[in-house]
Amino acid sequence: MSATIYGIKTCDTMKKAFRWLESEGVDYRFHDHRVEGIDRASVERWCAAVGWEKVLNKSSTTFRALPEAAKSGVDERSAIDLMLAEPTMIKRPVLEAGGRIEVGFKPERYAALFKG
């Protein structure tokens, strides 16, 4: 099964996910938000699959730097708009494989996806 992994190259969590995929022989394509951007359809698909609360990284430096007015009352629509404006607010990595979407990196979840 091949996969597409979305994120930014310099992220430590991304590097862990890359190492896991490579060690397990998983064929993957890397989509770098900073280089390639991200489209609304992808972000909407992720939010529909796992919930916008999981996709929006409220711990990111970019999100925390927002004015309080922008952070308060965030709903799905405003979260998607924020993530499109600043893709660094998307939790990393987002992995699409076999019709499934995983957000974040947990080796046991990747193992279940590719070996289960």
Image: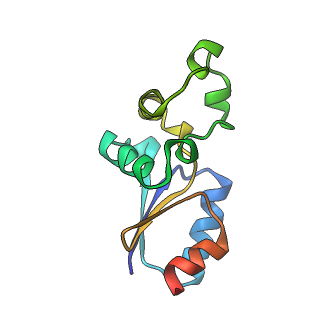
User: Where 93 falls versus 109 (above or below)?
Assistant: above
User: Which residue sits at x=66%, y=76%?
Assistant: 108
User: Where 110 falls versus 83 (above or below)?
Assistant: below
Q: Position of residue 17 (x, y in %)?
A: 60, 66
User: Which residue sits at x=61%, y=40%?
Assistant: 57
Q: Quadrant of residue 35?
A: top left
39 horizontally vs 115: left or right: left
Q: Position of residue 59 (x, y in %)?
A: 69, 38
Q: How is the image coloured?
A: rainbow
Closer to us: 26 or 109: 109
User: Where 83 falls versus 51 (above or below)?
Assistant: above
99 horizontally vs 7: left or right: left
User: Which residue sits at x=65%, y=36%?
Assistant: 60
Q: Position of residue 51 (x, y in %)?
A: 50, 47
User: Which residue sits at x=59%, y=80%?
Assistant: 111
Residue 25 visible in the shown view: no
Residue 18 visible in the shown view: yes
Q: Position of residue 25 (x, y in %)?
A: 51, 84
In which quadrant is the N terminus drawn? bottom left
Closer to us: 18 or 79: 79
User: Where 112 falls versus 100 (above or below)?
Assistant: below
Number of on-image labels: 0
